[in-house]
Amino acid sequence: MTVTGAERESPVVRITADAIVAIVLVAELYLTAATASIGEAYQPGISTLRAPLNPLIFLVIFAGVPLILALTLPRHRFALIKFSARVSRTGVVVCVIAFALLLILPTIDVQCREAPPPIRELRTTLWHSLTCPSFSGRSAAVALYAGALSTLIFLCARRLGKVDLEVRDEP
């Protein structure tokens, strides 16, 4: 049995990769959750800002696409499935924690001392939303949907990985 590059990676590399994925997902979840209740009618341009920073897009690109590529690239199948499973597993953990926090935080009565900006510009509205967030059901839905997508991709990656191992074991 030959050892591939994916099996030789050090624990430091794995922990660093997981930490990077977690940091990016936390940042995207926070931005999306903090601005979830702000509509385009209230603040023009907010949807354009939020769209590329959506955690669902991140998960599709970095967990879903490698899984699809694993089906078409047999030479790199195992490494792609493993990468997809690692990203989606980190996504599940981050989203479960974020969902729990987003359900708990609105019940805690924390008053924001800063008043909303008198002049509504994208920059000032975004600053106020990030420094004094008002989380709602839409905020929790962001984490819920991202967690559901992460779970689905993780289960698919696990299933493909098991099928791949069963096929490898056959003579």
Image: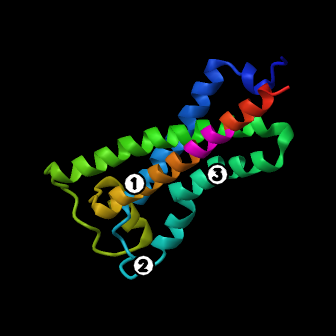
- The Cα atoms of the two marked residues, 2 and 1, are separated by 22 Å
Q: Which residue is mark 1?
A: 144
What secondary structure predominates along the stretch shown in magenta?
A: helix
Amino acid type at circle 2 is Glu
Of residues 166 and 146, the one drawn nearer to the viewer in this rendering: 166
Amino acid type at circle 3 is Gly
The residue positioned farthest toward the left in the image shown: 109
User: Does 41 appear above or below 167?
Assistant: below
Q: Earlier in the sequence, mark 1 or mark 3?
A: 3
Which of the 4 image quadrants contains residue 171? top right
Q: Residue at x 52, y 59 (%)?
A: 54
Instruction: Give the crowd class for mark 3: few <14, some 14-19, many >=20 residues within 10 Å.
Output: many
Q: Which residue is mark 2?
A: 40
Was residue 24 drawn as part of the magenta stretch in this picture?
Answer: no
- The Cα atoms of the two marked residues, 2 and 3, are separated by 29 Å
Instruction: Give the crowd class for mark 1: few <14, some 14-19, many >=20 residues within 10 Å.
Output: some
Visible residue check, residue 110:
no
- Residue 92 percent across, percent down from the top left: 47, 42
Of residues 127 and 96, the one drawn nearer to the viewer in this rendering: 96
Q: Earlier in the sequence, mark 2 or mark 1?
A: 2
Q: Residue at x 52, y 38 (%)?
A: 90
Q: Which residue is mark 3?
A: 64
Q: Which residues are magenta?
A: 155-160
